[in-house]
Image (cartoon, rainbow, N blue to C red):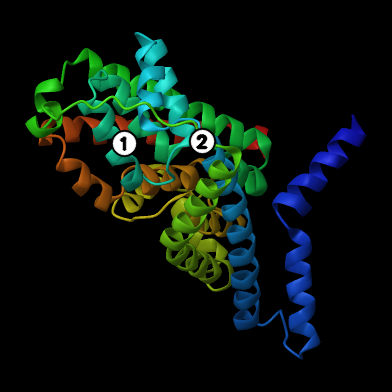
């Protein structure tokens, strides 16, 4: 058992967490005469290390996930989801969301396509909630920072929110609150061509490059914010605002996260810095969920497809779910970290 634990610790710290890279950068900075204990140099070390680490993980994960996704184009995904009914359909849609785009703005066009193709509205909303909130990338990245227990529980709870949210929307019969151009769009059933292995690899590479270009600016912003938090903001400030001393920290973090736009790759460095400064785990995860699921730009885009009443219900379901998850993680933090 100790051997397995040692192997996993090595994978988490040196393979996923790339602690060796942080030490290497620190040694290189010291070799050129820079003091890594200095705040400015410490911020520079944090920035270089986190950017490289996240970019490497980003490119690797997107390539693998895009290769998997090449087997699930919209037409095939629609047929797969059409085979399920009831909560099973919501669960299938939520699981499908784990191998699709990394941010809510990328998920909305697929949501619109599924809805116009005639899939039940609750099923498409389970997909819409799950896709930005829970994906294979988030599982690996969260594992590299917080460990496997946190990552697995996060994914399970995200799927639960997606299933419950979609089920509630289905029960409320909200179809009339979808914009008419979505519901009356022509349904085109085109069989996806069978791609060769080479074509799938090319597709995965193109998706990797395309996603990298879109999210890289947010990675730089996220790591920059993380570097400031890590080296410049006193630990007492973070602990007072987002620590156990503030019972409303989860709600505050959720509200602050909503107007922002980003994805899991941009919010991870911020979350990592907040955790080291004494913020509670659930509060941090609530912030991450709010940023990736309820960003203001994605809500503006979604408003083009659905009417205000349905949009308000979607936001309310996600917000309540995120806050509950936050308090749950805060309650069990001592058991899983």
* Quadrant of the frame with the C terminus: top right
Eye-nearest disc, 1 or 2: 2
Q: Do residues under tags 1 and 2 come within 8 Å of each other at their CB atoms?
A: no
Indicate the position of residue 130 as horizontal and vertical percent values.
41, 32
Question: Which one is earlier in the sequence, the residue at label 1 or at label 2?
Answer: 1
Q: Residue at x 45, y 55 (%)?
A: 211
**Real-space Cα distance between discs 1 and 2?**
21 Å
Taking depth in this image into account, of 299 and 239 the one nearest to the observer is: 299
Q: What is the secondary structure assignment of the residue under circle 1?
A: helix
**Mark 1 highlights which residue?**
110
Indicate the position of residue 118 as horizontal and vertical percent values.
22, 20
Indicate the position of residue 193 as horizontal and vertical percent values.
43, 32
Taking the view exactly as shown, the residue that stands out farthest to the top is 85
Indicate the position of residue 199 as horizontal and vertical percent values.
54, 43
Relative to 117, does residue 214 appear above or below in the rendering? Answer: below
* Quadrant of the frame with the N terminus: top right
Taking the view exactly as shown, the residue that stands out farthest to the bottom is 33
User: Counting other residues with Cα less than 10 Å from the Cα at mark 2, is it few (<14), some (14-19), or many (20 or more)?
Assistant: few
Q: Which quadrant holds residue 278?
A: bottom right
Relative to 309, does residue 240 appear above or below in the rendering? Answer: below
On residue 292, which mark appears?
none
Relative to 9, does residue 77 appear above or below in the rendering? Answer: above
On the question of residue 254 being in view, the answer is no
Task: Count all numbered tags in the image, as a single digit.
Answer: 2
User: Counting other residues with Cα less than 10 Å from the Cα at mark 1, is it few (<14), some (14-19), or many (20 or more)?
Assistant: some
Q: What is the secondary structure assignment of the residue under circle 2?
A: loop
Taking depth in this image into account, of 191 and 261 the one nearest to the observer is: 191
Taking depth in this image into account, of 44 and 283 the one nearest to the observer is: 44
On the question of residue 334 being in view, the answer is yes
On residue 195, which mark appears?
2
Q: Is residue 227 left or right of residue 252?
A: right
Q: Residue at x 61, y 77 (%)?
A: 44
């Amino acid at each position: 058992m100790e051997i397995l634990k040692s192997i996993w610790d090595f994978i988490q710290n040196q393979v996923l967490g790339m602690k060796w890279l942080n030490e290497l950068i620190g040694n290189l900075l010291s070799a050129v005469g820079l003091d890594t204990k200095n705040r400015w140099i410490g911020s520079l070390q944090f920035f270089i290390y986190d950017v490289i680490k996240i970019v490497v993980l980003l490119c690797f994960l997107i390539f693998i996930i895009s290769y998997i996704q090449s087997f699930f184009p919209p037409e095939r995904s629609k047929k797969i989801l059409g085979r399920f009914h009831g909560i099973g359909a919501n669960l299938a849609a939520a699981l499908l969301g784990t191998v699709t785009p990394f941010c809510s703005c990328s998920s909305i066009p697929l949501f619109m396509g599924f809805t116009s193709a005639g899939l039940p509205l609750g099923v498409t909303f389970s997909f819409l909630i799950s896709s930005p909130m829970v994906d294979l990338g988030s599982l690996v990245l969260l594992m590299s920072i917080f460990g496997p227990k946190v990552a697995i529980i996060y994914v399970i709870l995200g799927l639960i929110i997606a299933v419950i949210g979609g089920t509630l929307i289905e029960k409320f019969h909200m179809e009339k609150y979808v914009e008419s151009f979505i519901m009356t769009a022509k349904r085109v059933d085109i069989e996806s061509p069978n791609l060769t292995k080479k074509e799938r690899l090319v597709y995965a590479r193109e998706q990797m490059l395309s996603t990298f270009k879109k999210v890289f600016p947010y990675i730089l912003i996220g790591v920059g914010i993380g570097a400031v938090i890590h080296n410049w903001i006193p630990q007492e400030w973070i602990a007072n605002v987002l620590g156990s001393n503030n019972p409303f920290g989860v709600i505050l973090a959720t509200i602050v996260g909503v107007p922002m736009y980003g994805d899991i790759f941009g919010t991870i460095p911020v979350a990592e810095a907040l955790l080291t400064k004494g913020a509670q785990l659930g509060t941090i995860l609530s912030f991450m969920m709010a940023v990736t699921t309820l960003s203001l730009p994605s809500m503006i885009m979604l408003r083009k497809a659905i009417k205000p009443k349905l949009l308000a219900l979607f936001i309310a379901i996600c917000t309540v779910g995120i806050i509950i998850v936050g308090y749950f993680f805060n309650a069990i933090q001592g058991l899983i970290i």
